[in-house]
Image: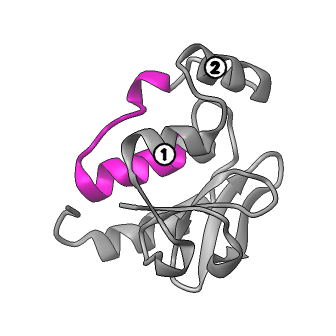
């Protein structure tokens, strides 16, 4: 269940993402989405990942060592998967091409991607979604 006032938190959280650089192990797609889940629900499932990797290669090595192959596997382990057409603001999405996690803001999802930073894609183009 989401905390009271999550809507304004989401707006501020998304806006803030456009002003931060992508940094592996600190501000990447998985940690960014996990921090949103923590702020929206209080559930923390990735704080023990922060700072343990600093590149795409080391991120995937850490995921593999913990039994995950992709960021979507982490979302599957902690959240309910839903049809992307049913995703609502604040739910998580999987980018259709980059396979990175992002946050639904309505008709679009916002994603962090290296090295380009923040990108946007239509929610209906996303192959997977998770209820937050």
Figure check: 101 above or below 51: below
Q: Which mark is residue 42?
A: none
Q: Residue at x 22, y 72 (%)?
A: 5
How many neighbours does mark 2 have within 10 angstroms: few (below 14), some (14-19), or many (20 or more)?
few
Give the camera-side residue of 41 and 125.
125
Sequence-wise, the earlier of marks 1 and 2 is: 2
Which residue is identified by label 2?
A: 64
Name the spot of residue 19 as percent of width and height, x first: 63, 60
Quarter of the image that includes the N terminus: bottom left
The residue lying furthest to the top in this view is: 65
Image coloring type: one colour
> Magenta: predominant secondary structure element?
helix
Instruction: Quadrant for residue 96, please give it.
Output: bottom right
Per the image, the residue denoted by label 1 is 75
Element type at mark 1: helix
Magenta stretch, residue numbers:
31-49
Q: Is residue 37 magenta?
A: yes
């Amino acid at each position: 269940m989401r905390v009271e006032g999550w809507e304004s938190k989401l707006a501020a959280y998304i806006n803030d993402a456009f002003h931060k650089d992508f940094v592996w192990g600190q501000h990447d797609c998985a940690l960014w989405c996990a921090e949103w889940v923590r702020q929206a629900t209080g559930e923390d499932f990735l704080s023990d990942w922060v700072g343990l990797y600093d590149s795409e290669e080391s991120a995937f090595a850490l995921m593999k060592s913990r039994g995950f192959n992709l960021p979507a596997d982490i979302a599957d382990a902690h959240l309910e998967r839903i049809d992307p057409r049913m995703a609502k603001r604040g739910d998580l999405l999987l980018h259709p091409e980059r396979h990175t996690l992002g946050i639904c803001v309505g008709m679009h999802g916002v994603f962090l991607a290296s090295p380009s930073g923040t990108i946007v894609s239509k929610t209906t183009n996303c192959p997977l979604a998770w209820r937050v």
